[in-house]
Image: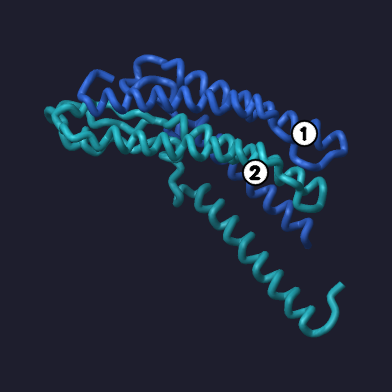
Amino acid sequence: MITGFWGWISAAVAIAITLLIVGLAFAILWALFRGTINLTYLLAEPADPRAQRSLPDADTPPETPKASLARFQFLIFTFVIAGVYLVLCLEAGRFVEIPDNVILLLGVSGTSYAASKGIKAAADRRPDPAAAGSDSHG
Amino acid sequence: MVRYVEWAVGLWLALTLVMVLLRIFTGRMIVAGMLSNASGRRVEIHRLQLFAVSLMFAAGYVAAALSHGGAGNPDMPDIKPVLLLGLLGSHGAYLSQKSAWALRKRGGRPT
């Protein structure tokens, strides 16, 4: 129940902020739909830049980005946990408790993704450019 | 009002997921080479096991959450520590193989 001047002011501010966030969310969705935000490389690791620069001849095809399993599992777990949390919140009408092990699951997934990126970056930063193969590991 | 916002957020998440899945199935998102080695010719077991474990874990958790919520308990279902340990092992196997690949690549050996 909204009462008093400040009650109406806070309600108006709350509604404005909510509309702003929801509007922003749907603007992002629209950009995804139109292709303004490009999803092509969402699951792909960039190609090894060193391998791109050291192509033996013009006939050698450039290295292409390769899909990354670490990105894929991170995406899956993020959607699953967020989706389940949202469904249960809608059902309960309140913020539901998140068990510690679920947080740990997201931690394992995120850490694995970060470690995978680190390993890939270390592999691409090898000292000898002549030894650069034409492979990319996701 | 709160209810409408909750449903709007739910709709947003569902539409985002549908869009990602559509891009994957129509080939507009790169998924090639996810399970294969660097040259893309051979499926690697450490990738396959992480892929299978991730999908099974995700599907199992969704099923557990739906039955948990359906039983009148709206809180998120917990995950057994032994299952979490299994997932950790799966990720560890994947990362150790990837580290070995990185060491081979840095050393200029065949990957």
Q: Residue at x 27, y 35 (%)?
A: A124
**What is the three-letter code of the residue carrying label 1?**
Leu
Kindly indicate the quadrant of the structure image that contains residue A48: top left
Q: Mark 1 points at which residue?
A: B66
Query: In the rendering, at what x and y percent does residue A59 appear?
Result: 15, 26
Query: In the rendering, at what x and y percent does residue A85 appear?
Result: 70, 44
The C terminus of chain B, quarter of image? top left
Query: In the rendering, at what x and y percent does residue B5 appear?
Result: 72, 58
Check the rendered structure and report the hue given to chain B: blue
Chain to which mark 1 belongs: B
Q: Residue at x 37, y 14 (%)?
A: B42
Q: Is residue A127 left or right of residue A73?
A: left
Q: Residue at x 24, y 28 (%)?
A: B106
Circle 1 residues within 10 Å: few <14, some 14–19, many ≥20: some
Compared with A133, A50 (above or below) is below
Q: In this view, does A104 lie to the left or right of A48?
A: right
Q: Residue at x 20, y 24 (%)?
A: B108
Q: Name the residue under label 2.
A: A82
Chain to which mark 2 belongs: A
Residue toward you, A114 or A138: A114
Compared with B81, B44 (above or below) is above
Q: Is residue B27 left or right of residue B64?
A: left
Q: Can residue B18 be seen in this view?
A: no
Q: SS class of the residue under badge 2?
A: helix
Chain represented in cyan: A
